[in-house]
Image (cartoon, rainbow, N blue to C red):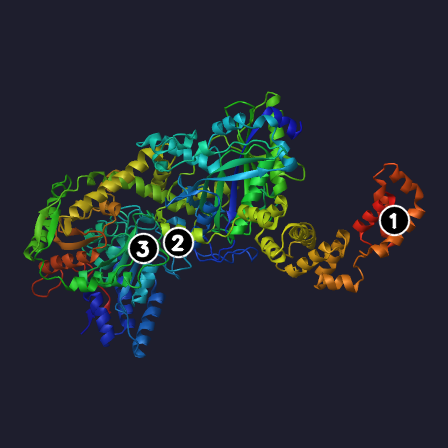
Amino acid sequence: MARSFDTLTAAEIAAGIAAGDFSAAEVCTAALDAIAAREPEVQAFLQVTPELAQEAAARIDAARAAGEALGPLAGVPLAIKDNMNLAGTRTTCASRMLENYESPYTATCVARMLAAGCIPVGKANMDEFAFGSSTDSSAFHPTNNPWDTARVPGGSSGGSAAAVAAGMVPLSLGSDTGGSIRQPAALCGVVGMKPTYGAVSRYGVVAFGSSLDQVGPFGRTVADVALAMDALVSGGRDPYDSTAQDVVPGFVAAAASAEDLAGTRIGLVPAFMEAEGLTAEVRAGVERAASALEAAGAELVEVDLPHVDAAIAAYYVIGPAEAFSNLARFDGIRYGYQEPGCANLAQQSALSRAHGFGDEAKRRQMLGAYLLSSGVYDTYYYAAQKARTLITADYTAAFAQVDAILMPATPHAAFRHGEISDPTQMYLSDMYTISLNIAGNGGIVVPVGLGEDTGLPMAAQLVAPAFADERLVTYAAVIERALADAATGAPVLGVAPACAGKGGELA
Amino acid sequence: MRELKEVLEDWEAVIGLEIHTELTTLDTKMFCNCKLTHDDEPNTHVCPVCLGLPGALPVPNRRAIESIVKAGLATNCEIQKHSMFYRKHYFYPDMAKNFQTTQGPVAFCMHGRLDLEVTGRGAEERPACAFGEAEAASLASASAGAVGLSADLSRRADSQPAPTGADACAQNDPAPNDAGGTALAGLSSYDTAALATAERREDGSYTVPIRILRIHMEEDAAKMVHVGGEEGRIGGAAESLIDYNRCGTPLIELVTEPDLRTPEEARLFMEKLRRIFLTLGISDCSMEKGSMRCDGNVSLRRRGDAKLGVKTELKNLNSFKALHDGLAYEICRQAEVLEAGGEIYQETRHWEPSRKRTVVMRTKETADDYRFFPDPDLAPFDLTDEFIAHCAAEIPELPDAKRDRYQRDFGIKRADAEQIAGDPACADFFEEAAAGLAGKAAQTVANLIVNELTGYLNAAGAEVTLETCGIAPAQVASLARLLAEDAISSNQAHEVFTLMAETGDDPAKIVDERGMRQVSDTAALQPIVDAVLARCADQAQQYRDGNQKVLGFLVGQCMRESRGQGNPKLFNELLRASLS
């Protein structure tokens, strides 16, 4: 009986290929079919890579035929955020500046997913250079939320989230500098995880804020995200990223251990739950998650993060400062957009940058250039770093009382394209995610059903102490199971209904 | 323009140096695994990291950190256990990321010192008025951190709130950059009170302490060649070529305090530093190839003034001579401008050795804003005591200690000891050749090395080094023995040296085969003396009348008579005896 491949989890695909139920080539074809059928509505991809996907699938089928051991993600289609290098593809960062840029090397995170057996089906859309929360700042096209195509998927990893929510891939990679994995995961109704800073290598991921950026996976189930996490940390500390750490690949085991939470203390931050701008349906969703944890035996405890109000301000100093520095290399000289007909070097750099970058990218770099200039630096950069220390200390103090903190991921459901035009309003929509990038801790977003008012996906966010990321998958799995369909055991949210079953049949 | 010596009577030159040294003896670059090379095809040793490609990240080279710690220990710096890399931003294609990874206010090495011995004619550049109290006042009022990068960083340090204030820093240090600032808080400063001030010795020589502000670690830029422009500049060039092989080469930058007062002191400082770095084995220190580069900052003030003048920065000082002559010219130029009522502008000037002048490269109307901030891709360093001790244990005997030992144990002249000890290969050679010798015998070996060997190597060109020239210490020892035994004259020694270098034979064999051994037999030489005196009766009479100089002529006649084989010293003695 034919069924759409989008009903399968990553774990089921890998198991099915290993068992010979279907081939990697068949899965690959199904994924490419699903993309072809759904992409016109969703526009999650900047580049689809059928040749690379088919080659990878063929290698897996050949390996299986030869009796070789298959990776834990063998044959699982993967979408890759377009700020991650994969040799043989363009890495555009959704910018005119890098429209035709092909990296000669592959990012460590991508290489590790491929080593685990993933087949790369394409590069996912994003806000230009990851500056945004809507994916609308992509220089090429917006991405639509699969649950309501008039709405944004969130950002900046909007393409990665939408591709998973639309059932085009079971797994994708995103990067999170201020919430860029967790916010689109929440808005698209999928699981998204930002590990602790340093858990996953940043080598080969085009930098936005070097002290804030972290790579993580999207999936439709916690178990799939755990599989991806194990793949990302396998092989130990990446010698090419001196900020990377050794992390034991224990995520699959942690997801499977979600049973009794007796003795576990979960924190709730009253100020977060009562914050202005938090919609009732989001709060209700978080409360559903809290109830699920409590039902599993966890104790709910109120904790305070007194300095977290400063997180957005600190972020909009540190982020732009680092972005200014990291994006300085895009000058149109060696690669990237080059303004034609320039008379001298200064003109060529200036005009290439003026015309290669979009508005938000220019806004952040100019802000960063200002914040780092002498005289101004002391006022803002030092203050931001002090705030960073205080916020980190807040989390440390909170984690002396609790094992994890439960909070909203976003104040509201997915908004319409163009609905938030004021940049500062857009920045405020990251109020629940940003402090984690400031502190460095990991966080996971798990769907909790549809909102009563909007009918759109709702989510809860869990935050754990630094390098205690395996806890996140354990607790998220508890929430997922508690809210799952009683009959089928399927997670509360699956593939967005408008996309489900569209193309991608697996014989 | 007036002469330097005359100018320095009226004006005090305040000189600071910024010295960049590539760590050429390492295998790989500062932040990636690319091989360090000198002359390979352009752009063949590059990777995503040193090309600054999107997504690439730096990983620091541990051995480079070891090298800079050694450099700091060898120059009496305090090793800072906690320091960071910073990003210094500027848009220019020689730095692929458009920022250079360098260090911030706290470098791996801070606040060092080298004592310079200034001797001979070079010592005369410092006028008599610049010693003792005047020198102490001068040192105290020369602004610390008034040069280059440090100035930029110290401005930042000044503008920071200083909760711990001056208490945490120097109390007896007049340096304004140490007057506060969180970035430098906790850093101990120079012990200026303990600095000896220069006093002139009877022979005119003096010793002066030169403070070192810092030595920091950074990466070198790519090499650019501008084709078709004037003097290799980018302005007006038809095309510009970039070789990224050099980009990312580990570079250490030493910044002195403006404690130097004459071009000779600057030259000696550079020489001394080069000898130390060569001995440490951290670089080939080639000024010619650019692996050791020096910029000079110089300003003038009237003798006795405390206020510093406006400085200019000199570039293209790529030899010891250029360093000396460039500074000497610039001092005289500034004096001329100031004496004519003109103004010195803060600018970078280019030394043109062929025309013996400096010309403006660029003027600095405003300070560049490099937007320094800590590099978020590189965690702060916390050097352990073990790491520093490991570096210290690897430091060989340094040139000053070696010089003193040679003078003490071998009894050779200090100047020769200094020269030999400054070149590690030469020092090893000397120690082998002079093993077991002392006094006159050791000095003979030293003479042969300083005069004959050095001369031979200089003449042989850059490709021939002490290691590859084929001359063995045993040969030089043998030659020294022949000289000590009076078997050959010092004039003959030169000829034997050349033959020995060419043939590889032992000098004794050369001398014997060619019949060069000089005759030191009185019985054989007396008849020659008698014959010469008989022939040169006039000169003999002149000598007897008190003209001592004529003896040289008579010795020469004897040598001619003996076809160069008679021992000239013996002839001298015999002549004196015969004429008395």
Q: Quick check: marks 2 and 3 in contact, CB under 8 Å?
A: no
Residue type (three-letter) at the residue carrying disc 2: Val
Q: Position of residue B366 (x, y in %)?
A: 47, 31
The residue under label 3 is A244
From the viewer's perspective, is B359 left or right of A401? Answer: right
From mark 2 to mark 3, how far is it between C-alphas? Answer: 11 Å
Say yes or no: labels 1 and 3 on the same chain: no
Q: Quick check: marks 1 and 3 in contact, CB under 8 Å?
A: no
Q: Which mark is residue A249?
A: none
Tell me the crowding category of disc 3: few under 14, some 14 to 19, or many 20 or more residues within 10 angstroms, Cα based.
Answer: many
Q: Chain of mark 2?
A: B
From mark 1 to mark 3, how far is it between C-alphas? Answer: 84 Å
Tag 1's secondary structure?
helix
Say yes or no: labels 2 and 1 on the same chain: yes
Q: Is residue B528 above or below residue B201?
A: below
Q: Nearer the viewer, residue B405 or A193?
A: B405
Residue placed furthest toward the top? B341
Residue type (three-letter) at the residue carrying disc 3: Ala
Q: Nearer the viewer, residue A277 or A339?
A: A277
Tag 3's secondary structure?
loop
Q: Position of residue B337 (x, y in %)?
A: 61, 25
From the viewer's perspective, is B72 left or right of B564? Answer: left
Q: Nearer the viewer, residue B515 or B23?
A: B515
Query: Disc 2 or disc 1, which is closer to the eye?
Result: 1
Q: Position of residue B168 (x, y in %)?
A: 34, 33
Q: Earlier in the sequence, mark 2 or mark 1?
A: 2
The residue under label 2 is B59
Q: Say if residue A458 shows up in the picture.
A: no
The residue under label 1 is B557
Residue type (three-letter) at the residue carrying disc 1: Gln
Q: Chain of mark 1?
A: B
Tag 2's secondary structure?
loop
